[in-house]
Image (tube, rainbow, N blue to C red):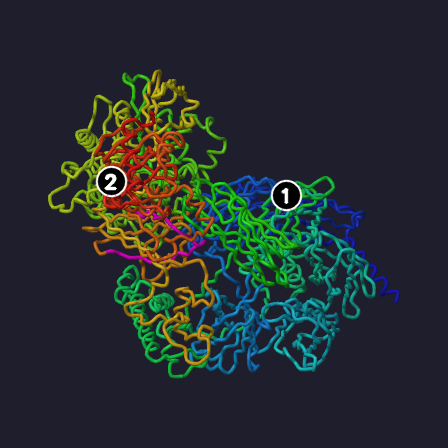
Amino acid sequence: MRNTLLLIMAALTAVSEQNPICLITAPNIVHLGVEETVTVQLQGATKPTQITLYFLYQTDNNKDLSGKKHVTLNEANGYQEVVKMSVIPSLYEKAIKNIGKTKTIVPYIQLAAESKDFLSKKKTILLSTKKGYVFLQTDKPIYNPGENVNFRVFTLDNYLLPVEESINVKISNSKGLLVYNQALRSSKLLQRNIMIPDVETAGHWMIVAAFINHPMSNSSVEFEVREYVLPAFEVKIAALKPYYLVTEESFQFSVSARYTYGKGVNGIAYVRFGLIDGEGNRTHLPGLEIKTSIQDGVAIITLPTEDLRGKAEKQSIQHMEGCNLYIAVTVLETASGDLEEAESTSVKIVTSPYLIDMSKTKEYFTPGGRFSILATTTHPDGSPAPYFHMRASVSVTFVGGTQESKMEGSSNSKGEAVLTFEVPKLATSMDIKVFAEGGDKEVVVSDAKMTVSAVQSEGNSYLSVEIEHVTLEPGGTMTVTLRDITPPGTPRPAYIYYMVLSKGRVVQMNRVQRTELTTFSLSYSLDLVPSFRLVAYYFTQAPEKTTIVADSVWADVKDICKGQIEILPFKEHKPADLVNVVVRTDQGDKVALAAVDTAVYILNKNNKLTPQKMFAYMNSYDLACSMGGGKNYQSVLQDAGLTFITSWVDTEDHVRKDYSCNNIRRPKRALNYHKDFSDIINKYPDKMEKRCCQDGARFNNLGLSCESRHAKTTHKKVPCRVAFLKCCKDATKLRNNIKKTRKTYSLARTDGNMDEEEAIDEVTVHLRSYFPQTWMWDIVDVEPSGLVRHSIAVPDSITTWEVQAVGISKTKGFCIAEPKPLVVFQDFFVSLRLPYSVKRNEQLQVKAVVYNYRTDSMEVTVELAWVEGLCSAGGDRGDKKVVTVPGKSAVPVYFTVVPLVIGNIPIQVEAYTKTARDQIKKDLKVTGEGELVSIQHEYNIDGNAAKSIEVNIPPPPNAVPGLESDAYISVKGGVMGESVENCLNLDGVDRLISLPKGCAEQTMVTMSPAIHAMRYLDTTGQWIDLKAERRDEAQAMIQIGYGRILTFKKTDGSYGAFLSTPSSIWLTAFIAKELSQCRDVIPVEDSYIQQSISYLVSKQLASGAFTDPNPLYDRTMQGGVGGFEGEVSLTAFVLIAMHHAVPLYPEGQGSEVRYAMEQAKVYLGSKLDSLERPFAVAITSYALSLTSPGEDAASMAQTKLRALAHCDNEVATCHWEASDALRLSGEKRANLVPQAQAISVETTAYALLQTVAKGDVLYATHIARWLTKQRQYGGGFRSTQDTVVALEALAKYSILANDVEDLDLNVEMCHQNGRKQGVHLTKRNALTLSAFQVNPGSQITINTEGKGNGTLSVVQTYRTLERMDLICSFYSLNVSVEGEVKYRKNADDGPELYDDYNYESEGDGNPSDEPMSRVEWFDLRTRRKRHARQEEERENSLVYTVCVGLNSGNSTGMVIVDISLLSGLKPNMQDLEENVKSTEKYIDHYDIAPNKVFLYFAVITEEPQCVKFRAEQISPMGLVQPAAAEVYDYYNPERRCTVFYSAPQKSSMLSKICQDNVCSCAEGGCPKSKVTYSKHMEKETRRSFACFSPVVNYGYVVKIVNSSDDGVFKHYTTILTKILQTGKDVMQTGAVRDMLKRKACDEFDMKTDSNYLIMGRDGTISDTTDHSGKPVYVLDNTMWMEEIPEERKCKATKNRKACNMLKDFMVHYELNQCSI
């Protein structure tokens, strides 16, 4: 015994004399610039020891990357310490810069540990550039094209505290193209927005934000872009279970269809089914369709499993398990004919209704310890399946045998179960199976199994870390058991050490003295959120070997923020109520609020910023790769996210290679048994062909044959066109078969027609859902009390809003509150729907809808308030009606009104009962009759001018009488003054060019002028004179334009006019040029421009020229593309574009571009002699001046250009003209030569650019003076190209001439009446002087004096029912409107089958309630036609047919048809969409503006092309006035044709809808006939009218020659046969005058060839003139209108006296008038 003690003491003495053993741990991924935790520990030390730690970069000669940390370990700190250190970014940047040119940069650094006594080691560690947190939030997850996306960026450090840093924000569109790329200063919370282009295709956009120089810190958020529209009612599919168990006989689900106010829909449901495999491929299952009725909004559907399996096998799907069931439902409401759809894909087909997940169970166990099986039971959709009885069977393997054991337990509310058992000491592996039991002991899940292995340990020493597997709650503690297991005779450790890691950092490090069963308590701490890992270990020392015994475990923690935030609950509110949003915070600074309609999340809830997302992001810093434990101690440390250095063994082998964990076990995914993707139409498995087949089978409303429709598909590939034609013919045959065989509707279906119907089963579902804009996107400061109080009015929507709040605090960090619902509801209210605008004197029925959400019926009084200028039934008391509104229902109430005044008329409706009241007020916009037109002129003004300028503003010709016309004069300084400010924002651009902007090239109008205007203002220093926000607006507009233009980009870098049109060389060059010039204003991806340039280079001909196979631009047709000099013009244009792109190619790059430019220059030089057209010469001269300055070719081109100039020395101007005379031999069609105006502007602009490039200021001034005279009021020219080029030229000239620097100009305007107005122009007000209003019909003399020059612009606007610029010799245009009832027959599509008009019902059944055949459902859904109504609606649906063609030749440029809709209509968007996007294409694009539709045609021919679309009435209308439609060449807007069209002749829209008082009021101003034979007519009656009341200015006898009708007025052409008295209209007998009355005055008329006595005041003589310039008379109730009886009628004895009184008056009045 004594000897044993001596031996032990000797051994201990030997150990103590040895160096202590050292363990250093660090994260196995270090983050650049982030404070990391490194732990240092000594075992067996007896004296203080200092260790030095630092990071270095071995690749760069061991350069230090951090400061050196000196750590002293002693008894006071237990010989262990946690050290905080970081890699300094600036040192790392310097190091990689040093080696970047010679060596490969590797993402590894070294941790060095040095001690002078015993240690000097390094450890290689993976370096990450991830740091902190970047959170992104959008205001909603789904947007319509054309909407604004609001987004926020929150920047935080690793402790979740807000930091102000530079971040890079990138936004990609649905094609993956970068539309936004900006470096921004975050200011802790950044708020920005981006516009989605209105032409954007459906898909997902992505915002990515990262700290600059820390690319791995990127965070992203996706949002969806797609079109959605307002539904009539909402259809929902609800499965009773979230899974479909194949062992059950059938699957049951419900379909609900309800209006938004709660009422259930009665109608028919048509249900289709399909299967979706694991890859998302959908296979339709023909023959499974179910048709059933919906009563009170509900239908229960049962799908037999046997039927499903049979139809699946027909489609070669042998195994349905693992697929999702696709359900599509179409619901038709029989009363209104409204049709809505829904689809469901969430139901999974399974063999078991539950899944058991054991991924949280450790893969290694400690022999002799306790092992916990962690199992979670879920439904197939991932939702928890709670409270199951759980059983586990464990087969333990020993050396030479096995042992079975069983255990039981129960799962909690989250479906989680923990089954713990003792592990035998000699176990080497264990096979675990887990079972979940139902209530009757039936095993419902039995396939969860896993195998776990024993930890490997040297010396058979083990450590088992055991915890209670529960979530650690605030205020709670967790008991940790550390069970050390050592072989007999082995020394037990004195201490067991442990570390607690959370988010990759050591938050606690300690040791605990070993006892028989070592335990300690761990308290809840916010540092542990969202989860932590506990790593425990002890050392074993033997004379020959030192080692570690370790184990670890993962534990969950209740997710709570450090700085807590809570939204206080809301009470229910009514629409427009003021709501107080109260948020309670814990020392917050700011709270970001948002409110989203919960309906948004029905469709897409994936990218909401939630507390769960925040905690998951925090967890991303957890570097661990297992749920705990490990194969050996090295594995335990590494899998916990640690790397380590020991003093006794080299650990360099254990270096982490990947940022992610490659070996993480994930829950098992369902097997994908279904391999083949089968199409809905079996013959066409290809998706593209499937779509084409669907379109071919679609019902055609133009009545075209299949062959005619096939001709519209030339833009598609051949297989698509073949499928289209085949399916069109199949569908036609089917419809004809039904016509022959079908006599009545039947719920049953026979097998005989099954195969025929399978050809047309599936159509893409149009999901129609409406989501209003999000609301309350505000950032609010926190009060000192910690409360946020924000008062705001809720929107009018009746819905539930989800209110979200995000708090940030510089002390407590960042936190996302749990959202709270805000219910906005009103059980009684009235809504009002008005058309966008109506014309004066049109009649409409204002529709007010009274909603009653209560259960009981209500008697409601509805009142329309009286307002001046509006005729209604109640006169000045207003109009009142009483209606009964049933519970849970809505009733419309109509008020007939007639607006008599122009402007906004407030329409106020109030609805009330004894217990409820609501009112609503909206403005009715009333415009004048006819179409608005403008006349514009621009003049140059100069201080040195010798002569005055005479500005004549004549009375407007053919204006609508009684409407004011306006005229304005604008004076601006310098040549750019009139244009600059309108270049800088979107509203201004609309004034710059009054044209639609739907295609790719038109988009550039929002970019190019702005870029040149910004450069002009930068150079001249005039920003200070504009609004402070103008520069930001301009930059934002260019950014929006950039995002929109990328929508048109194709993968090869080329561009077409629209998404689906072929690429154009000219357009690609134009966009590449403009984007090159954008680069110094907004960030532009250079690679996109380079792709475009490469595309252009690839299309260059061997001669060096370019030719465009798809000419878009008609300007260059003559003197350009397509003409004899077309190649020259296009080559020069491409050369200019390449020149602007040269800076993108540094020296040594872009050799093919430079070579292409040389080839183009040689080609242009070779063609110079033969050029005749000014356009070709001007653009060639400019191209050569840019690319070959000083060379012979450039000089020769300039000489030739100036020889073609038209210079006027008297007014000092020069310009270039295009004319018919320049047509070359062989060019037959004169109509293809564009008119001079637009092409002359552009030609002259290129000449100015060339002159400015040469620096010739004097000659450039002459050109600029002519160009400014062509400019229109507002600063633009005629189309996009002439405007873009002219403004670029004028801006560059203005910069060269510096024409506002010394501006000091006095401008005097002298009016005819002697009034004078003066303006003093200086540099400070050159851009900002307001316009002056002047009276039409006047002449103004302009005198100038002083220094400098400017421009004076005049615009005159008025309304007319005629157009003077009708050039209809070129285009033919016809617009007709029919009621939908006329919209019937088709060439080959057989009968109409979507309604109940075409057959006789047999028996008593109501056929409109019966479901229809599948062909008819197909027609119904694809056309969205209305079913036969059971109750009459007052609103009509109309069909527009628009036919446009050429009278001769073909048009190659873009042609636009601009249709002003009849009052009260809105177009059917889906019809327009299908005209553009279907396989058969009728138009290239469409645009919608208030009361307008624009149709785009890339090509039109002599054969008229027709387009049909429906338009719905918003309000019933009467006496609807004609509207205008116009066709014009976009690039030559002078070439246009205008027509007026009217409502259908026999429709109610042209008749009166007013009654009684309303008519009396509306017709109060109508002329009234005086009857010669009236008993009230006395001798002095006429004289009293003429001389006393009202006193007349004129009196005539006129003869009616003829009359005409323009839809608004009836015009009478009259000849004066006798003049009794003349007023301001001085004339002779025989003069012809136009007299007119409103068409609504139908009780008054004048007969042709009859004579009338007419007397009135001068006020009835309009300022408007007729075609010959003579005044027009407007007949009204202040005039005396008396038909002079024929002589034969006066001979009757009874009539003689009356006739004589009339004759006597006329004789006496002609001689004496009012003299006695």
Percent position of residue 1480, x then y: 32, 62
Q: Nearer the viewer, residue 1165 or 717?
A: 717
Query: Percent from the top left, x then y, of residue 465?
Result: 74, 64
Which marked residue is nearer to the observer: mark 2 or mark 1?
Answer: 2
Whether residue 937 is situated above or below residue 1447 in the rendered picture: above
Of the image marks 2 and 1, the number of the one nearer the N terminus: 1
Give the camera-side residue of 123 and 1226.
1226
* Rendered position, 41 above or below 279: above
Please report the bounds of the magenta region as a residue range.
1504-1529
- Residue 1682, percent from left and from top: 32, 40
Q: Which amino acid type is marked by label 2?
A: Lys
Q: Is residue 1510 magenta?
A: yes
Residue 829, numbered label: none
Asked whether, in this view, residue 480 is left or right of residue 1687, the answer is: right
Location of residue 1202 with respect to 1604 vertically, above or below: above
- Residue found at the far left of this picture: 1225
Q: Residues within 10 Å of mark 1 (few under 14, many from 20)?
A: many
Would residue 1476 appear left or right of 387 to someone viewing this image?
A: left
The dot on residue 162 is 1
Figure quadrant of the C terminus: top left
Secondary structure state at the residue bearing disc 1: loop
Judged by its main secondary structure, the magenta piece is strand
Mark 2 sits on what residue?
1599
Identity of the amino acid at label 1? Pro
In this image, 240 relative to 1395: left or right? Answer: right
Q: Secondary structure at mark 2?
A: strand
**Magenta stretch contains residue 254:** no
Could you give the CA–CA distance between mark 2 and mark 1, rounded to whole angstroms? Answer: 88 Å
The residue most toward the right is: 2
* Relative depth, front residue between 1165 and 640: 1165
Q: What is the quadrant of the N terminus in the image?
A: bottom right
- Structural crowding at the residue carrying mark 2, measured as other residues with C-alpha within 10 Å and reported as few (<14), some (14–19) or many (≥20): many
